[in-house]
């Protein structure tokens, strides 16, 4: 037993003195952490870019509708929806769902849907249904119309060791009509 212990100690001393291939061992130890950080950074960057593009989609469609003077042809609204899909490029827009809604906030702050249009599977809100508006916007919008732009997209990771499955990104924007009057879709 004593001979075995001496042999092990002798090997450990020799191992400690040996310096060749230390860099290779250190690199092998740190490589998984470097790859994890690199790929994770790429995925998070991609997620942030997709979220920003989704914000542009939701905001731009609602803003274009809010610029209409009185009425907007339904064909023009559909063109806005289709054009907004190109904003997502080069990221996939197959799961991009859009909804534009016109609401009226009465003097008591109760918001009701006047009309709502969905695109690519986006669920339109039922006419005359109540609509939840953030308190800050509600207080400034009593007895006024609002155009609400909503967009959602499914985000799925390229490499699934960081995020096991995707999730839904969503954005909502509120605009007052430029001419401070109701906008209808015909």
Image (cartoon, rainbow, N blue to C red):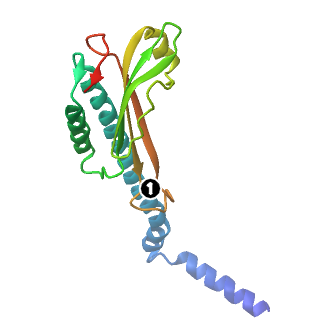
Q: Is residue 27 above or below residue 137?
A: below
Residue 44 in view in this figure: no
Where is residue 142 shown, x and y percent of the image? 45, 9
- Residue 10, image x and y in percent? 64, 85
Quarter of the rendering containing residue 7: bottom right
Q: Is residue 85 above or below residue 157?
A: above
Q: Secondary structure at mark 1?
A: helix
Is residue 51 found left or right of 167 in the rendered image?
left
Q: Is residue 173 visible?
A: yes
**Callout 1: few (<14), some (14-19), or many (20+) C-alpha neighbours within 10 Å?**
few
Q: Position of residue 180 (x, y in %)?
A: 30, 10
Relative to the observer, which residue lies in front, 153 or 18?
A: 153
Along the viewing direction, whichever of 21 and 58 lies nearer the viewer: 58
Question: What residue is disc 1 on?
Answer: 37
Q: Residue at x 44, y 77 (%)?
A: 20
Question: Where is residue 176 drawn, in percent x and y?
Answer: 34, 16
Q: How many numbered circles are shown?
A: 1
For the point 35% across and 49% down, which residue is it? Answer: 46
Seen from this angle, which residue lies furthest right? 1
Quarter of the image with the C terminus in it: top left
Q: Is residue 59 above or below residue 136?
A: below
Horizontal side of 131 relative to 144 (left or right) equals: right
Residue positioned 49% across, 25% down in the render: 131
Q: Is residue 22 positioned above or below 99 on the image?
A: below
Question: Which image quarter holds the N terminus?
Answer: bottom right
Tell me the quarter of the picture where residue 35 sits: bottom left
> Image quadrant of residue 67?
top left
Q: Is residue 90 left or right of residue 11?
A: left
- Tell which of 118 and 62 is nearer to you: 118
Residue placed at 50% from the left, 21% from the top? Answer: 134
């Amino acid at each position: 037993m004593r001979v075995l212990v001496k042999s092990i100690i002798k090997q450990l001393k020799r191992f400690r003195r040996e310096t060749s291939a230390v860099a290779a061992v250190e690199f092998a130890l740190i490589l998984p952490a470097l790859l994890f950080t690199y790929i994770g950074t790429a995925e998070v960057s991609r997620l942030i870019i997709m979220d920003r593009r989704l914000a542009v989609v939701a905001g731009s469609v609602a803003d274009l509708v809010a610029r209409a003077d009185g009425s907007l042809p339904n064909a023009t609204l559909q063109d806005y929806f289709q054009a907004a899909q190109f904003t997502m490029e080069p990221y996939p827009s197959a799961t991009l769902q859009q909804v534009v809604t016109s609401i009226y906030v009465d003097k008591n702050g109760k918001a009701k849907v006047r009309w709502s249009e969905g695109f690519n599977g986006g669920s339109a809100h039922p006419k005359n249904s109540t609509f939840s508006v953030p308190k800050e916007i509600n207080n400034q919008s009593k007895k006024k119309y609002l155009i609400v732009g909503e967009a959602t997209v499914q985000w799925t990771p390229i490499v699934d060791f960081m995020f096991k499955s995707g999730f839904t990104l969503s954005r909502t924007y509120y605009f007052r009509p430029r001419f401070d009057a109701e906008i209808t879709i015909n």
